[in-house]
């Protein structure tokens, strides 16, 4: 509006010049103003038809709290004249923060490509995206503004995988005991021998009192409960089946708090897997990444591989959310869910569909709603909710 008033003022002055001072001079000024408007309008309309945008990120994968660049490239396909003034506004997903402004103005030379770098910083684990929110075109005189058709830049999306950390939380006895009780052991196991310490519990299974440093995997919880003291097996005959884990990331909630909650629950699941591996337990981890996937976690290297996969994790379509519930073949599976109190209905539907235990974060704000529900805090300490 300000530029339009300025242009109209110039036209008015030119008319006064022509009428009261110098007719030919005023006519020349009016002619130049008209030519300027025509050229400005032509550049605007041509740019609207021919401008193309793209995004390229400086890296495809990154750790958390690392800076990277997003290059926004604008191509002016017309060689004759430069583009009009191009105003670009970019946006990024909630797990990415902006270091430099996400809005800028530029002019692209004819037949050239103009690249402007925007500096960003990774914040939370998972798939991050950077895209163009809008492109507005201003004519040279600043009189007319048009929006570039979104079809020219809607596919201009940069994606970055942000690696979650694998927290080192040490051994949490209550959690490991509860998890190991869920695992089914060899059917021949028995606690029938109750006479002597460190002797055979059943043929082929020798036991002794628990000592600090013994793997919790070896504890015979049934015999320990009956004797009122911890008893461990001495042989390798007992084998534990895999504990099944599921990662649930609903898609209805989108804000920075939810992105932080996803980060917390993903790292909490990795912390639990790490603890189980240290104690000799195997696990089966199920997650959605372009379809439901399952990974056997038998050693530390498997957690590293899973960590790489989870760098691309993102909320998945609602219709795919409970696809895993019909394929659960394990007893007492554990679901790590990113549900929050703000999406109470989603957690309620999860409880109805999933027959097992649940782990939620303190950040979620969820209260106990089912019997076997665990809370994990920001230091990745697990406790059963009462």
Image (tube, rainbow, N blue to C red):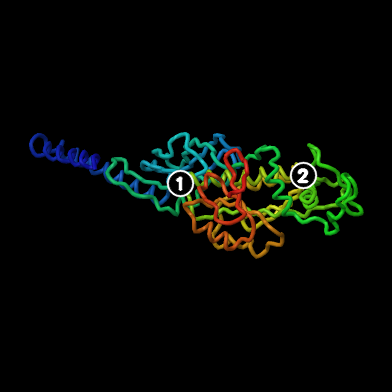
Dividing the image into 4 quarters, which one contains the N terminus? top left
Where in the figure is residue 174, as x and y percent of width and height? Answer: 68, 45
Q: Earlier in the sequence, mark 2 or mark 1?
A: 1
Q: Residue 326: which quarter of the image? A: bottom right
Compute the Cα span from label 2 to label 1: 52 Å
- Crowd band around label 2 with a 10 angstrom C-alpha radius: few (<14), some (14–19), many (20+): many
The residue depicted at 21 percent of the width and 38 percent of the height is 6
* SS of the residue under disc 2: helix
Nearer to me, 19 or 87: 87
The answer to whether residue 308 shows anywhere in this view is: yes
Residue at the spot of label 1:
132
Where in the figure is residue 260, as x and y percent of width and height? Answer: 53, 43
242 horizontally vs 66: left or right: right
Tag in front: 2 or 1: 2
- The numbered disc on residue 49 is none
354 horizontally vs 363: left or right: right
- The numbered disc on residue 216 is 2
Q: Relative to 374, say whether 26 is above or below.
A: above
């Amino acid at each position: 509006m300000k530029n339009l008033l300025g242009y109209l003022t110039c036209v008015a002055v030119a008319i006064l010049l022509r009428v009261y001072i110098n007719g030919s001079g005023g006519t020349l000024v009016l002619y130049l103003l008209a030519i300027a408007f025509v050229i400005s309008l032509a550049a605007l309309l041509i740019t609207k038809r021919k401008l193309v945008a793209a995004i390229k990120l400086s890296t495809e994968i990154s750790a958390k709290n690392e800076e990277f660049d997003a290059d926004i490239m604008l191509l002016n396909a017309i060689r004759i004249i430069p583009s009009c003034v191009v105003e670009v506004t970019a946006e990024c997903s909630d797990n990415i923060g902006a270091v430099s402004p996400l809005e800028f103005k530029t002019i692209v030379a004819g037949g050239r490509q103009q690249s402007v770098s925007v500096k960003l910083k990774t914040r939370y684990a998972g798939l991050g995206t950077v895209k163009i929110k809008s492109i507005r075109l201003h004519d040279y005189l600043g009189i007319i503004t048009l929006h570039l058709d979104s079809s020219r830049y809607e596919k201009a999306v940069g994606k970055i995988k942000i690696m979650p950390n694998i927290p080192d939380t040490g051994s949490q006895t209550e959690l490991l005991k509860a998890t190991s009780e869920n695992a089914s052991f060899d059917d021949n196991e028995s606690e029938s021998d109750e006479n002597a310490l460190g002797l055979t519990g059943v043929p082929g299974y020798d036991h002794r009192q628990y000592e600090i440093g013994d793997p919790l995997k070896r504890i015979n919880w049934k015999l320990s409960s009956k004797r009122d003291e911890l008893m461990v097996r001495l042989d390798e005959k007992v084998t534990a089946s895999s504990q099944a884990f599921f990662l649930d990331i609903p898609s209805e909630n989108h804000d920075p708090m939810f992105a932080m909650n996803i980060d917390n629950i993903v790292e909490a699941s990795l912390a639990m897997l790490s603890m189980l591996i240290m104690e000799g337990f195997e696990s089966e981890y199920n997650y959605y990444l372009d379809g439901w996937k399952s990974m056997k976690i038998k050693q530390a290297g498997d957690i590293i591989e899973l960590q790489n996969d989870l760098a691309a994790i993102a909320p998945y379509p609602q219709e795919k959310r409970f696809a895993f519930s019909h394929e659960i073949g394990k007893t007492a599976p554990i679901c790590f869910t990113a549900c929050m109190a703000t999406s109470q209905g989603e957690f309620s539907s999860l409880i109805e569909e999933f027959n097992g235990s649940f782990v939620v974060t303190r950040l979620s704000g969820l209260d106990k709603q089912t019997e076997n529900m665990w809370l994990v805090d920001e230091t990745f300490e697990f406790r059963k909710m009462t």
